[in-house]
Amino acid sequence: MPDSLRGRSSCVFTTIAAALLILAGTVFPLDAAAQLPAGRDVAEVCKNCHADRVETYLATKHGQKGNQRGPDCQTCHGDATEHVKAGGGRGVGGILGFNNKAIAADRKAAVCLSCHASNRHLAFWDSGRHRKNDVSCNNCHSLHGTPGLGSTIALNRPNPSVTPYQTTVRELQYETCVSCHKQIRSQLLKPSHHPIIEGRITCNDCHNPHGALSRAMVKSESIPQLCTTCHAEKRGPFIWGHPPVEENCLTCHNSHGSNHNRLLVEKAPNVCQDCHDARFHPGTVYDGSGGWNFIPPRNNVPNTRLIARGCVNCHSQVHGSNAPAMRGKFFLR
Ligand code: HEC
Ligand code: HEC
Ligand code: HEC
Ligand code: HEC
Ligand code: HEC
Ligand code: HEC
Ligand code: HEC
Ligand code: HEC
Ligand code: HEC
Ligand code: HEC
């Protein structure tokens, strides 16, 4: 296009844009916006160009009229006077765009923390792995609601969110998490897995995504404590306790998913033989001599210690037992 026409066409566009604004029912005269209205009324100015954003925002908990302590556009996006004067645009007028990668994650989080810092869930935000890796609040939370599933911001799934639409939406919270944590996603698809994709438990039943001092930001001080909040029957104390169970469930189990039954880290009987190998009968599992037989000569029936659940065929109470005498001591059924 020749230079002479360029100015003309942009002029035409401006005229068309202005005409469109009038057709759409301009809510607030832009030329009067040198002095932006205070508080929530500022939305009337923004509506001229961001009608969809205003609408989705007003439907959230933050935007609800009754929510007097909630924010207006400028508490989150900063002073918009210059932005409006200049006719808007990305990064124009020092506007704080949360999708603008040039703006530090901490600065974005600071906006939210100015109101939410005292929330007990956020007590360890500063020391959490997310903050330290430049993940910010808006990477998980959708601040403008997500009408329908076609969210324009892939990371922001409807739940968790401040959206009023969450009850009608099928997507589950874990989807937000696994959009970044791909390895965890693949663990969830293994044959044995915690029922997360089934929607029975969520990632934050076990983790505090806002940060925690514990290993892997889990919600409890120790692993057995975490697991027994749901699996209470494994808590004990038992008359006959099994030391590795009291110490750490993850010695034998994966937390997300596994190719072995019951979330086991390896196949039975290997999971037992890691520790019990040099002893009396356990040490004989792989000697090829067959059957369950304490006293030689051994017969040649298949070795019961290798069938199906392996050692657990007999030692079914591996998590601990209150049964009397030998049955209890050796975790037998
Ligand atoms: C509680 C904080 C908060 C409030 C209040 C808020 N926003 Fe936002 N806004 C965000 C966040 C976070 C994003 C980026 C994530 C998203 O798109 O949901 C965003 C995105 C936007 C975008 C798109 C930016 C882009 O990168 O394309 C516009 C435009 C916008 N907001 C305008 C508004 C207007 C207008 C209001 C007032 C009606 C408002 N916002 C109120 C937090 C807020
Ligand atoms: C005259 C039109 C106009 C008005 C009025 C206007 N904006 Fe914008 N704004 C824009 C345009 C154009 C963009 C660039 C958006 C895009 O490319 O999608 C933008 C971008 C933004 C962004 C994203 C900035 C970034 O760097 O990513 C935010 C946030 C925003 N506006 C907030 C507001 C708020 C809050 C108000 C009301 C106080 C407002 N705007 C009023 C036109 C306007
Ligand atoms: C001006 C103060 C203020 C700011 C800034 C603010 N919030 Fe809020 N937020 C509130 C209030 C008030 C509520 C409603 C709390 C209530 O009803 O108990 C709320 C509620 C929430 C909720 C819970 C919504 C629900 O459905 O229960 C989330 C999540 C949230 N805010 C996240 C954010 C994020 C992320 C940011 C930054 C982008 C942010 N907030 C910025 C005041 C604020
Ligand atoms: C890694 C993802 C993630 C990040 C990052 C994140 N959140 Fe959340 N947030 C969640 C999840 C998941 C929940 C739902 C927790 C629940 O239901 O117990 C939640 C819940 C909340 C709530 C409601 C808590 C309540 O009292 O019920 C607030 C407020 C909140 N987040 C604010 C923030 C703020 C502020 C930031 C940034 C400093 C932030 N979040 C960063 C995932 C995240
Ligand atoms: C925007 C991307 C992103 C999202 C979304 C996200 N995370 Fe993260 N997460 C990270 C990064 C980056 C790290 C730090 C690097 C790492 O350990 O992989 C991290 C670390 C973690 C850790 C600590 C790992 C460790 O070794 O200590 C846990 C646990 C975690 N995230 C859980 C969650 C949960 C639960 C959610 C959803 C509520 C979530 N994440 C959503 C990016 C994300
Ligand atoms: C049943 C409890 C539980 C659930 C549910 C759970 N996790 Fe974990 N997660 C753990 C435990 C325990 C660890 C610590 C593992 C370790 O230290 O070996 C962990 C570790 C992690 C780590 C650190 C990296 C790794 O593989 O060790 C990330 C990241 C993580 N989880 C993300 C998630 C995400 C995302 C979800 C939801 C899809 C989720 N977790 C659901 C218990 C759980
Ligand atoms: C929030 C509750 C919750 C927590 C915490 C929890 N689990 Fe589970 N776990 C479940 C549910 C629900 C099932 C599925 C039970 C069913 O299908 O009957 C399950 C199943 C299992 C199974 C059997 C899996 C299979 O394939 O049959 C094992 C093993 C297990 N959990 C171990 C653990 C360990 C180890 C921890 C700690 C890292 C833990 N759980 C923490 C809720 C939880
Ligand atoms: C020494 C290894 C070991 C340790 C440590 C261990 N488990 Fe297990 N667990 C097993 C084996 C083996 C099975 C499979 C039992 C079967 O096939 O009947 C199992 C099965 C389970 C099951 C599913 C079947 C059932 O009995 O309900 C749950 C739930 C479970 N374990 C939870 C836990 C929890 C919680 C902890 C920590 C407090 C823990 N386990 C520690 C070896 C272990
Ligand atoms: C991390 C190491 C470890 C693993 C893995 C382990 N155990 Fe143990 N087990 C121990 C320790 C330590 C004792 C206590 C030994 C003692 O008191 O002499 C014990 C005790 C026992 C006892 C009672 C023995 C006695 O003399 O009182 C039996 C039976 C047993 N384990 C079976 C199993 C089975 C079956 C498995 C696999 C599901 C298994 N163990 C996995 C460490 C382990
Ligand atoms: C067919 C049933 C059966 C199977 C299978 C079995 N055990 Fe045993 N186990 C027993 C009985 C019964 C005792 C008590 C023996 C005694 O009277 O000394 C015992 C004792 C033990 C002891 C304590 C005595 C010792 O030798 O230290 C350990 C440890 C043990 N078993 C581990 C295992 C392991 C590991 C496996 C799998 C490789 C396994 N058992 C498979 C029945 C079985």
Image (tube, grey):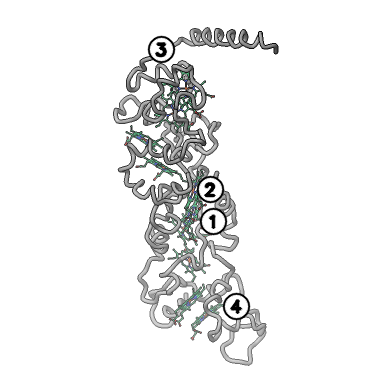
Amino acid type of the residue that numbered disc 4 sits on in the rendered structure: Thr
Which residue corresponds to the image point at 51% horizontal and 9% vertical from the top-left? 18
Q: CA distance from mark 1 to mark 4?
A: 27 Å
The one nearer the camera, 166 or 295, is 166
Circle 4: element type: loop
Tell us which disc is closer to us: 3 or 4. 3
Residue 100 vs 207, above or below: the answer is above
Pointer 2 or 3: first along the chain: 3
Pointer 1 or 4: first along the chain: 1
What residue is pinned by disc 4?
Answer: 304
**Res. 28 mark:** 3
Which residue corresponds to the image point at 33% horizontal and 30% vertical from the top-left? 70
| Residue 169 horizontal/vertical position (percent) | 49, 35
Amino acid type of the residue that numbered disc 1 sits on in the rendered structure: His
- Evaluate if marks 1 and 2 touch, with contact meaning CB atoms under 8 Å apart: yes
What residue is pinned by disc 1?
Answer: 193
- Evaluate if marks 3 and 4 touch, with contact meaning CB atoms under 8 Å apart: no
Pointer 3 or 4: first along the chain: 3
Circle 4 packing at 10 Å, graded few (<14), some (14-19), many (20+), is some
Circle 2: element type: loop
Residue 67 picture quarter: top left
Q: CA distance from mark 4 to mark 2?
A: 35 Å
Circle 2 packing at 10 Å, graded few (<14), some (14-19), many (20+), is some
Q: CA distance from mark 2 to mark 3?
A: 47 Å
What residue is pinned by disc 2?
Answer: 197
Beta carbon at label 3 within 8 Å of ligand 2 = no
